[in-house]
Image (spheres, rainbow, N blue to C red):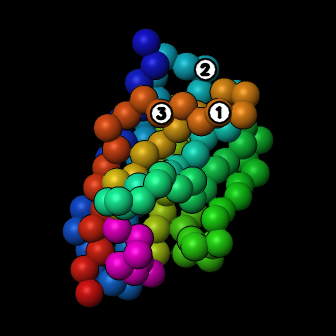
Amino acid sequence: QVRLVESGGGLVQAGGSLRLSCVASGINFKIYTMGWSRQAPGSQRELVANISSSGSTDYSDSVKGRFTISRDNARNTVFLQMNNLNIEDTGLYFCAFRRGYIYEYRGRGTQVTVSS
């Protein structure tokens, strides 16, 4: 059974930082592209960062230059370092693995709340 367990969210002031972690089990982690998405209340889920099996990264324009995605294949873990947070970054953050062209979500997410 595939499981993704996200952690590291919390309440932070604007301009602050958080580091999210996601531990995967039940998949051959190192072969998959991994991604981080977020969903704000009333909004669709948005993919904000992804990292390929070879370590190539890509970011949405909304987080480019502020967020960094990384992975540790030995620990089946993907990270999202978030700096200079703003109120628009508030949301429930999920990690996912990409199977073909589809990102699959198997976790409950971790809440990030940015206050002014």
User: Residue drawn 29% across and 74% down?
Assistant: 114
Q: Compared to 24, does 64 lie above or below? A: below
Q: Which mark is residue 102?
A: 1
Please indicate, yes or no, whether residue 102 appears anywhere in the rendered image: yes
Residue beneath disc 3: 105
Q: Name the side, left or right, on which 8 lies relative to 57.
A: left
Q: Secondary structure at mark 2?
A: loop
User: Residue drawn 57% across and 59% down?
Assistant: 48
N-term mark: 2 or 1: 2
Q: Which mark is residue 23?
A: none
Q: CA distance from mark 3 to mark 1?
A: 10 Å
Residue beneath disc 2: 28
What is the three-letter code of the residue carrying label 1? Ile
User: How many residues crowd around disc 3 within 10 Å: few (fewer than 14), some, or many (20 or more)?
Assistant: some
Q: Compared to 105, does 1 lie above or below? A: above
User: Residue drawn 67% across and 38% down?
Assistant: 33
Q: Quadrant of residue 104?
A: top right
* Of the two numbered discs 3 and 2 in the rendering, the one whose residue sits closer to the viewer: 3
Please indicate, yes or no, whether residue 9 appears anywhere in the rendered image: no
- Check if residue 99 falls in the magenta segment: no
Where's residue 14, x and y in %?
33, 84
What is the three-letter code of the residue carrying label 3? Tyr
Q: CA distance from mark 2 to mark 1?
A: 16 Å
Q: Secondary structure at mark 1?
A: strand
Magenta stretch, residue numbers: 84-90
